[in-house]
Image: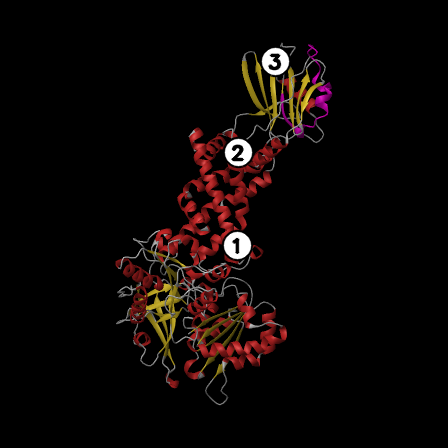
Amino acid sequence: MIRTLHRWPGLVALVLVTVLALSGAALSVFPAADRLSAPQAVAGQNVADLAARVAATHPGLEEIRRSPSGRITAWWFDGGTPGSALIDPATGADVGSADPNPVERWLTNLHRSLFLDDAGRLVMAAGAAAMLVLALSGAALVARRTGGWRRWFARLRGPLAGRLHTEIARVAVAGLALSAATALWMTASIFDLLPDASLRPADPATVSGQTGFPLDRMAALRDVPVSALRKLSFPYAGDAQDVFTLSTDTGTGLIDQGTGEILSWADPTPWQRVSETIYMLHTGQGAAALGLILGLVALAVPVMGATGALVWLAGRRGRPRLRDNAPAGRAQTVILVGSEGGSTWGFAATLARALRQAGQSVHLAAMSAFDPDRHPRAERFLILAATWGEGDAPASAKGFLDRLARMTEAPKAPLAVLGFGDRSFPAFCAFAAEVEAAARARGWETLVPMDSVDRQSPQDFARWGRALGQALGLALELDHQPVRPAADSLTLVSRRDHGAEVQAPTAILRFALPKAGLWARLTGRGFARFQAGDLLGILPQGSTLPRFYSLASGSRDGFVEIVVRKHPGGLCSGQLLALEPGDRVQAFLRRNPDFHAGRGRAPLILIGAGTGIGPLAGFIRANARRRPVHLFFGMRHADSDFLYRDDLAGWKADGRLTELTTAVSRGARPHYVQDALRAEAAQVAEAVRRGARVMVCGGREMAQGVSRALEDILAPVGLTPAMLKAGGRYVEDVY
């Protein structure tokens, strides 16, 4: 609900809110500019002295005003001709025009009303309301993403657009909410929707009837410093019954022109003080520094608008287009999807289509949007959940388990869970199993037992569909045709072969970087922008199922590089190792933001074996800032599969690699990378204690051995791999 409340006002009112923000940011400069450019009254100068100086040089003086920036202007009527000017308070002489800056006047009209008078004011008020909704809902979403209000500035992960959107929001949201709320208050005041804030002094019962009392001797004016003046209005010439009207920060009074005495006085009401404070907060008048800060904050709006739109577009690309998706409140069947790369959405779309053909109304949504109250007519819930990493929730299922745990009772409609994964991984469908266990613990009735789909098998999916159809009393045939991902053609430019001596052919393959169009460069799609640690999906001939390889290069390197080892009977690895320079493959990128080195200065401990050196080598290659990097690399035979040997030597010579430790598992003294870690336990423990980040890449058994070794190594300093993982300081890319 909060995400929807945040998304649609942002998309619908993006242009209007951007105009508001940019014009407001430009206007924020003028109070500070006025403060710097306008002559200021000297300390201790009073209103009596100022009025006497101005009156002496301007016959027919009618009014003196002081703006919150200290700018003093005067208006007069001399010989039937009106005049006005900016005044130097030290001399009372004219120093410039009193007319507003034409640029400021134009920007003010744009900001207030789009040059459309009252109708425009209402439109801009709607924009301010949208900004307020965006700020408040955005704050709630930031708190949800970071794990609570106390973790507001916690480290973020994920794609660049989403991280940038959230990082800026964390700093700007308070200022944007303040600007939007004060704008709405001022609009309501203009349209008389708020009580009148001012209180005028009572009309005097009698006046002296005299005129001409010297201004510089009036005690009522001598007691008021110029810094407190707002306005001094002079009596009408020749009218002995008229009076001076003095407005100051502390109130408004009427002064007898013949005696200089105060005839009546009115203090500002609390409501008036609130209104004046809100005006000051919104315009920066009287608080130029605050105005500049809020103006700077306003500049975040177009950036957040652009990044928010990119996040929305990325989300839409990750889901199928649902033309017949029933409204949430009227659906009989609710399908909830947990997907990381998008493939599970395709299976969900096939299921939804089959159920609709069987006469069901179906609503398809992400698991992260789960809310039973939105589905009052639901007769069943079907969850299709992939597993990410080591049993973690995929992107579109974040927060599902927390929301389920907070429910006071389980939904009345029964549940079926289908897991998606790769059976070769120990954490096969672990997240789906966790969802099933949590549902049972809450007492959620089961429609059919949990089942699984191995490696996106259409046969597994069809088998589960028949079981589901039997439970529903429907003839349900799920004929899923995987959609081949959109791919680019990559041309091999070079290869370096290793591993012949240990009967494990391995090659470092370098492909030419495809040219990216302008839109791809702006949005980061395709091969326009990527980093070492991201994944390259290869589409082998004769299969619709992609195989993924960790990238050993970034887009700034100007090429696409992977490390491939030949697997017995491996379709994709066999085709890749058969390539010669000039040959082509079909490939696409998948972001892997949780396995990036980042731009921090914290030392890196990189641990890899075999082809796991690929992304680690990419991190070292990109280490232009020379942050400390210690690489632990395991291989079978130094003469056969010491991948990147010459590169590592060069990187160490120019400071990109601080230290290299190797482990050779075959030979006279065989040992593994975890043994190398134990041999340098004290150094590793001290580096981690001082903030080093550990990154592991390679086979699953190697990663498990490394984790066990680090358990022992870190115990003396009171740390564990689990603690480091929770803080984002221990990350793995295992296969």
> Which residue matches tag 1?
143
Q: In which quarter of the image is the C terminus?
A: bottom left
Q: Name the residue under label 2.
A: 186
User: What residue do we see at 51% from left, 50% from top?
Assistant: 139
Contact between marks 1 and 2 (CB within 8 A): the answer is no
Residue 727 horizontal side relative to residue 50, left or right = left
Quadrant of residue 465 within the rendered picture: bottom left
Drawn side of residue 489 relative to residue 731, left or right: left
x then y, percent, for residue 349? 31, 60
Q: How far apart are marks 3 and 2 (CA)?
A: 33 Å
In-front residue for pair 661/467:
467
Percent x, y of residue 169:
51, 50
Under mark 2, the amino acid is Met
Q: Give the range drawn in magenta.
A: 207-232
How far apart marks 1 and 2 lie (CA) works out to 30 Å
Give the residue pinned by disc 3: 236
Whether 283 is among the magenta residues is: no
Q: Is residue 602 above or below residue 201?
A: below
Residue 213 position (above or below residue 433): above
